[in-house]
Image (spheres, rainbow, N blue to C red):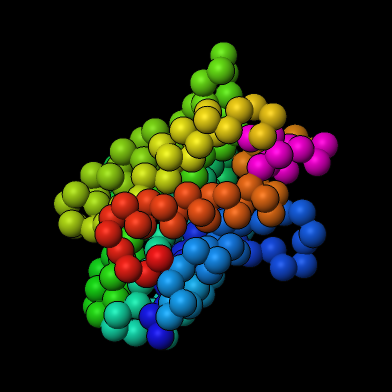
Amino acid sequence: MTTIYLAGDSTVSSYPDRPVQGGWGEFLHRYTAHDVKVENRAIGGRSSKTFIEEGRLDQILSVIQPGDWLFTQMGHNDASKEKPERHTEPFTTYKSYLSQYIHGARAKGATPLLLTPVGRFHEKDGEYINDFPDYCAAMKELADEEEVLLVDLNTVSLQFYQISGIEKTTSYFMLSTGIEDRTHFTKEGADAIARLVSLELKDLGLTIV
């Protein structure tokens, strides 16, 4: 049995006790191969930095096995300049922290995979805007340097919102419940993003989906 471990933030996290809110990691198992297990270790409010500082990466690395995968989506909280305990700089500390996920997985015989931060519901004049351009660029740069597989989830999610239209896209976010939240997904939205991730994995030729 191959296991995919997920390291990420609230957009990836599972919400089993919440009837409406979801994260894409909660639904990825629906789209993986029958012999693949998803272990979602993502948790809200964490950046590439704090996930490590709290020992959460070490917890994954203590159990991950050769042949397993470590998927990492970080960036939403890294971009929070108003919260210095979370914040990282894209082309320096962000890349440095992300490299620890890569090297840690490889040292255990597992395969790392990076995902750029999933897009927020930021629409202007009919276009959906990338709120994390430098973090996306830095992650792509690191993926090239380290020869790591990468899913550009930011780009494909923004394209998906564009195709879906404003009404449908609204239903994917907690904004649709009457709160001003353009970051977090409803269960429907989280499931849609999980499916997007699986399609990107198929495009990479991976047999885990």
Rendered view: 32 above or below 34 = above
Q: Is residue 69 left or right of residue 24?
A: left
- The picture quadrant where one finds residue 110 is bottom left
The answer to whether residue 59 is seen in the rendering is yes
Place of residue 136 in the rendered image (x, y in percent of width and height, measured from the top left): 36, 40
Spot occupied by residue 112 in the image (x, y as percentages of width and height): 31, 66
Residue interval drawn in magenta = 169-178
Res. 52 in view: no
Q: Quadrant of residue 155?
A: top left
In the rendered image, which quarter contains the N terminus?
Answer: bottom left
Tell me which residue sits at (41%, 60%) in the image: 72
Q: Position of residue 131 (x, y in %)?
A: 49, 32
* Residue in the image at 61% along x and 52% along y: 190
| Number of callouts | 0
Percent of width and height locating residue 99: 28, 60
Q: Residue furthest top?
A: 125
